[in-house]
Image (cartoon, rainbow, N blue to C red):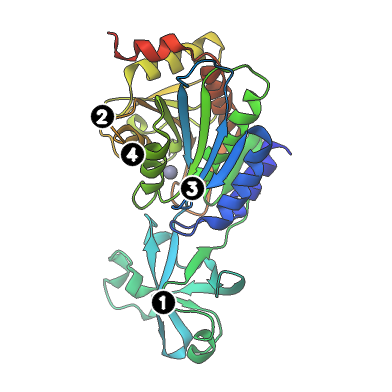
């Protein structure tokens, strides 16, 4: 299957933080052909192992992680008239919600009810109301069902996903929801596929982590369990566009970004840059002095501390239903990471503390 189709299937699978199972099952299916072991852990993360060709008792391990979960909505109340109130799971921007179509995953998720997010019409707003930021109190979901009909299958806590279509734009650009971070998951799958064509000595643990958007717990728990020698997170970063500060954004189509800053081990950053240069893989350096925004932080502070790195795909409209990226960047990240892994030897691990 082509990478674009893998990405389409991944972004279409629901996986709101804490309920990643549909996306986890799909991810496990895609990873299975390229690794030796696949399992789901207690948190809902997908854990895979692809063994390297090393001998001896001490097996060197790299953990690569892309997060499985996506942001979404959760029902807080069903009001008279059948109007549903919601809150956010993860960092959803309320201003993007009015006018959206939604799917409500009723029952165990098998019963999907369609709805729309409505708000007060502009004609009826009080003076000054339209200039105030919109909140969840201003929004409701309308399904057409009455309160009593809804209560047969919908309850407080039921998850809601905004409808969005995987859309191919011109020149290799693609728009979809949950690109953050299914694009990272797709890139991780592609990394493993490419590693089947290259020799590597280190064991590779490829993890699709749960709950990055709310707590980073999936990365913390898997790093604790595996205790890798090094770890690299794969995520998305701010793509530039109108109104986006240039110093905090990166070009789409110019390759993945390599994280540089206190969250990232300098030897890992350096080697990623060296590999990119040597193999002529386009890349951008992302200076980030404030650790904390990705799984790279959760990995770095696990156990007694794990040398970590971060590779990111530039993405426009982050945390919306039209997250735009360039497929070429997803492929380049996979190329960079698979070459990096194939070059890891015992000396790299020994040198991590030599400056
Ligand atoms: Zn993310």
Labelled pair 2, 4 in contact (Cβ < 8 Å) = no
Identify the residue under disc 3: 45
Q: In this view, does 192 lie to the left or right of 136?
A: right
Front residue of 339 and 77: 339
Secondary element at tag 2:
loop
Badge nearest the viewer, 2 or 3: 3
Whole-number angstrom distance, CA of label 2 to CA of label 1: 40 Å
Among the two numbered marks 2 and 1 on one chain, the one whose residue lies closer to the N terminus = 1
Front residue of 93 and 16: 16
Badge nearest the viewer, 2 or 1: 1
Front residue of 216 and 332: 216
Q: Is residue 317 above or below residue 301?
A: below
Quadrant in which residue 261 is drawn: top left
**Is disc 4 surrounded by few (<14), some (14 to 19) or many (20+) residues within 10 Å?**
many
x, y percentage for residue 3? 67, 37
Whole-number angstrom distance, CA of label 2 to CA of label 4: 16 Å
Q: Can residue 169 be seen in this view?
A: no
x, y percentage for residue 84? 44, 79
Q: Return the mark for residue 156.
A: 1
Q: Is residue 234 left or right of residue 329?
A: left
Q: Residue at x 60, y 46 (%)?
A: 27
Identify the residue under disc 2: 289
Whole-number angstrom distance, CA of label 2 to CA of label 3: 28 Å
Among the two numbered marks 2 and 4 on one chain, the one whose residue lies closer to the N terminus = 2
Secondary element at tag 1:
loop
Q: Is residue 254 above or below residue 161?
A: above
Among the two numbered marks 4 and 3 on one chain, the one whose residue lies closer to the N terminus = 3
Identify the residue under disc 4: 298
């Amino acid at each position: 299957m082509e990478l674009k189709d893998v990405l389409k299937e991944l972004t279409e699978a629901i996986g709101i933080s804490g309920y990643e199972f549909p996306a986890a099952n799909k991810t496990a299916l895609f990873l299975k052909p390229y690794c030796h072991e696949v399992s789901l852990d207690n948190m809902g993360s997908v854990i895979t192992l692809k063994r390297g060709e090393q001998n001896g008792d001490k097996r060197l391990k790299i953990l690569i992680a892309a997060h499985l979960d996506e942001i979404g909505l959760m029902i807080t109340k069903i009001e008279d008239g059948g109007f549903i109130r919601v809150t956010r799971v993860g960092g959803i921007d309320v201003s993007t919600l009015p006018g959206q179509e939604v799917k409500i995953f009723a029952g165990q998720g098998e019963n999907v009810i369609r709805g729309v997010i409505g708000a007060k019409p502009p004609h009826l707003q009080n003076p000054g109301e339209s200039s105030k930021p919109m909140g969840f109190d201003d929004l409701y979901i309308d399904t057409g069902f009455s309160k009593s009909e809804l209560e047969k299958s919908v309850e407080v806590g039921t998850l809601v996903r905004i409808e969005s279509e995987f859309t191919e734009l011109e020149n290799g650009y693609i728009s979809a929801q949950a690109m953050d971070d299914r694009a990272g998951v797709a890139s991780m799958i592609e990394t493993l596929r490419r590693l089947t064509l290259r020799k590597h000595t280190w064991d590779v643990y490829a993890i699709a982590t749960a709950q990055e958007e709310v707590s980073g717990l999936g990365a913390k728990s898997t790093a604790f369990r595996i205790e890798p020698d090094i770890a690299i997170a794969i995520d998305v970063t701010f793509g530039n566009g109108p109104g986006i500060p240039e110093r905090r954004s990166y070009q789409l189509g110019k390759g993945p970004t390599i994280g540089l800053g206190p969250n990232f081990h300098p030897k890992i950053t350096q080697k990623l840059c060296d590999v990119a240069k040597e193999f002529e893989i386009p890349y951008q350096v992302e200076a980030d002095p404030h650790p904390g925004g990705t799984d790279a932080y959760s990995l770095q502070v696990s156990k007694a501390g794990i040398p970590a790195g971060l590779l990111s795909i530039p993405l426009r409209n982050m945390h919306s239903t039209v997250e735009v990226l360039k497929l070429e960047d997803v492929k380049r990240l996979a190329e960079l990471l698979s070459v990096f892994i194939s070059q890891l030897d015992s000396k790299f691990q020994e040198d991590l503390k030599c400056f």
